Image (tube, rainbow, N blue to C red):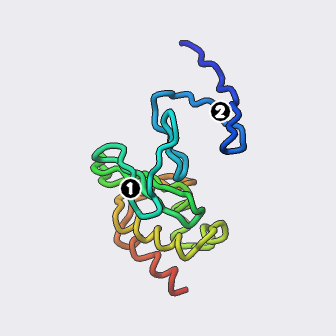
Amino acid sequence: MGHREAPRPVETKELGFRRYKLCYLNAVHIVGTTIYKDTYIDHDFAHHIAYEIDSGIKVVHTPGHSSHDVSVVAKNVEAHGRVAVVGDLFECEEDLRDPSLWQKSSCNPKLQLEYRTKILEKANFIVPGHGPAFKVTPEVRRLPLIALES
């Protein structure tokens, strides 16, 4: 087994902070709504345009927890259907029944609820920011509407 050189910090004047050299030099790096491969890639997430990785995987803007959050949606995942990897859009499965778990750390709870609802409408499984993945059942799909009423 070989050993990889540790990433070295690189000063980036345009961003004003230190950044580490990317370990996978030929990869497209997506961090929030920022996309980078050799140079920054301009992509219009603000107008709800998904960034397509391939025909079955796309990155969609899902703001609310923060203004730059994104989710990765994969279609036709064997035995699971459509899977959404959502970060802190959903903290964990328990936050479906206890909205305070996600609302207390949300920069825009109303917007976050809107995107939570959109993901619940389309996903069969959700991988939250914390905790195990969970299946989206018909009961789970109704839960965000309950949160609006309370």
Identify the residue at image location x=37%, y=53%: 83
Residue under label 2, please give it. Answer: 20
Name the quarter where the C terminus is drawn: bottom right
Q: Is residue 1 above or below residue 55?
A: above
Direction top: furthest residue = 1
In the image, what residue type sits under mark 1? Ala
Residue 60 % position (x, y)? 42, 57
Q: Secondary structure at mark 2?
A: strand
Identify the residue at image location x=57%, y=31%: 22
In the image, what residue type sits under mark 2? Tyr
Residue under label 1, please give it. Answer: 50
**Front residue of 77 and 34:** 34
Direction front: furthest residue = 14
**Front residue of 86 and 8:** 8
Residue 146 % position (x, y)? 48, 81
Q: Is residue 71 above or below residue 27?
A: below
Q: Secondary structure at mark 1?
A: loop
